[in-house]
Image (cartoon, coloured by chain):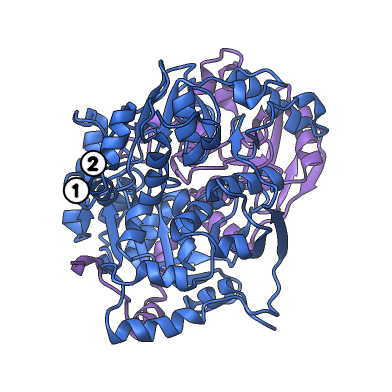
Amino acid sequence: MRAFRRVTSPALVLDRADVDTDQIIPKQFLKRIERTGFGEFLFWDWRQDPEFVLNRPGAHDAKILLAGRNFGSGSSREHAPWALQDFGFEAVVAPSFADIFASNCLKIGLVPVVLPEGEVRGLMAAAADGDELTVDLDAQEITGPDGRVVAFDFDAFARHCLLNGLDDVARALEHEDEIAAFERAHPAPFATTALP
Amino acid sequence: MGRTLLDRIWDAHVVTEPPGEPALLWVDLHLVHEVTSPQAFEGLRLAGREVRRPDLTLATMDHNVPTGAGPADPLSQAQLEALERNCTEFGVPLYATGSGREGIVHVIGPELGLSQPGLTIVCGDSHTSTHGAFGALAFGIGTSEVEHVLATQCLPQRKPRSLRLTFTGELPPGLTAKDMILGAIGRVGISAGAGHVVEYAGEPVRALSMEGRLTVCNMSIEWGARAGMIAPDETTFAWLEDRPAAPKGAAWERTLERWRELRTDDDATFDTELEVDVSTLVSQVTWGTNPGMVVPLDGAVPDPGELDDPAAREAAERALAYMDLEPGTPIREIAVDRIFIGSCTNARIEDLRLVADIVAGRRVADGVRAMVVPGSASVKRQAEEEGLDRIFEAAGFEWRRAGCSMCLGMNPDVLAPGERCASTSNRNFEGRQGRGGRTHLVSPAVAAATAIEGRFVEARDLAGVA
């Protein structure tokens, strides 16, 4: 996983509630068998509208997305965070995230930051002119274009993994002895390989 | 203090919980399909890892597969072939299209008897919550997690909060599990379950068939819950007995004793409690672009102007524009172009029997295209043995092969821009069933009756059988 410490950049403002992963990356783009190249299809249907924020000049410079509540609801497709990351985003700030989406982001080093709705609105207003803000995971704070600093909570272990770019699978396999012991103590109820 | 069903299953699956870290949770069953797995297998290959427990893993083809006679499009075909190659290389059993065992992953798990009480079940698909109907802890995961489970048979997880949704009252005749869950989501909102595992409780849940419980748990994710579960009871056990993967003989008796203990203690407490009375429920129809935008069939399209919350108001306005609906329009006056009966929510045999009962001897309205897509090859066979296919075709429905089909439109089954569809599936998001398509979520009973009338109605509104 890509390590993340902090990012300073203009932010893209997507002020809509309940943006589902079908919007972030529509199903017709889920047929690829690679992990990369999804950025050009990000918000595909909405991008057909020339006024959509992603079509504005400078959209590609934004590494921070400011979004509405319950961002990433619906389908578990990890293609959604892949597309956001491939487009150039390194952090998404919203009042809340759907569970699976947030979990998928953490696995790939895209940082989901939760702030109270009022704070997100404040950042949206302050960032509207393309001024830069900083998301600092190390310090657990966001600095707005006006210099205002907002602290945020973050799961301590998830933060540790992101800061160090730790690989989950390798970490789990450090517990091989415990996994093997559990396996021995819990015989499987069936074998999918031996179904009649 | 008493323990919840979630506590019992969770505690029994913690492999280790290092201080300050998430628990490493053992996975009893990992279901795999073609869309969210190729990058996971590739990750294994790059790291030189193997699938730890192919015998606890089962793959099928469902999302992409065509349900008509033609072949898959080249990209879909490549993805299906990738799954086949990966399963061969890593020794994972695969129920491929044409094997006669394929189907929607959340339909075949239960019908094989793999989805059992007390198990942890994961799949790279958000509707994995379905399997919780058996009293399992079942949840959807992303592709990185699919790779993690393939490699370790474990998943690092923080324990979610617990939520009990108690249904009260008696479900009026003619209403279904779909109306219960749509009504509940409309009441509590689409993110009320976030961060929680839900246990559905109450007499109306106990009264549901296994198929109905699967429908309820299936839509747990539509209100943000990580998983939904229903404590197992005699209905559960009767459904599972003699299924291929269920224990047999003396082992069945021993297992039953264990399963009967899988319940929430009377003195257990939940982080959140919700209650929904179903005694006055009527058939539900969504009008907008998320499952919480739902009204009674007797109602009308709501007026966004009456919403206090600015974000909700703006979402409702956007939804109405997308759906091309005017506030105040009676739901019964909305005409449809398409009917989709299928998906992991409502494509099991009981759903198809219900539809057949309603459409027998009737005809799909002129100008309406209607299709029935069985949830699995096994459901298809069963329906054909019962003659349901002939009833559907005589009524003017297309009878298709098993798959996810138009629930998400990754195969050729899609809505054209502007087409309006009454669908028994689970998501009415913008473009879900095809770019520009307009989806109204309903029960199989409402979908069937609506097919005949060409606008939203219930079965009891239909004129007598010709």
In this rendering, position of residue A92 left or right of residue B89: right
Measured as percent of width and height from the top left, residue B6 is found at: 57, 71
**Quarter of the image holding residue B174?**
top right
Name chain B's colour.
Answer: blue
Are the residues at dot 1 and dot 2 in contact (C-beta closer than 8 Å)? yes
Residue position marked by numbered label 2 in the rendering:
B80
In this rendering, position of residue A68 left or right of residue B383: right
- As displayed, is residue A161 above or below residue B255? above
Pointer 1 indicates a residue of which chain? Answer: B
Task: Locate the C terminus of chain B by quadrant.
Answer: top left
**Type of the residue with mark 1:** Glu
Pointer 2 indicates a residue of which chain? Answer: B
Distance of label 1 from label 2 (alpha carbons): 6 Å
**SS at badge 2:** helix
Is the residue at mark 1 from the same chain as the one at mark 2? yes
Measured as percent of width and height from the top left, residue B412 is found at: 31, 27
Relative to the observer, which residue lies in front, A91 or B445?
B445
Measured as percent of width and height from the top left, residue B390 is found at: 26, 36
Task: Please name the residue shown 66% across and 36% down the image.
Answer: B296
Label 2 crowding class (10 Å Cα cut-off): few <14, some 14-19, many 20+? many
Name chain A's colour.
Answer: purple
Residue position marked by numbered label 1 in the rendering:
B84
Measured as percent of width and height from the top left, residue B221 is found at: 55, 50
**Type of the residue with mark 2:** Leu
Label 1 crowding class (10 Å Cα cut-off): few <14, some 14-19, many 20+? many
Task: Please name the residue shown 31% across and 41% down the image.
Answer: B403
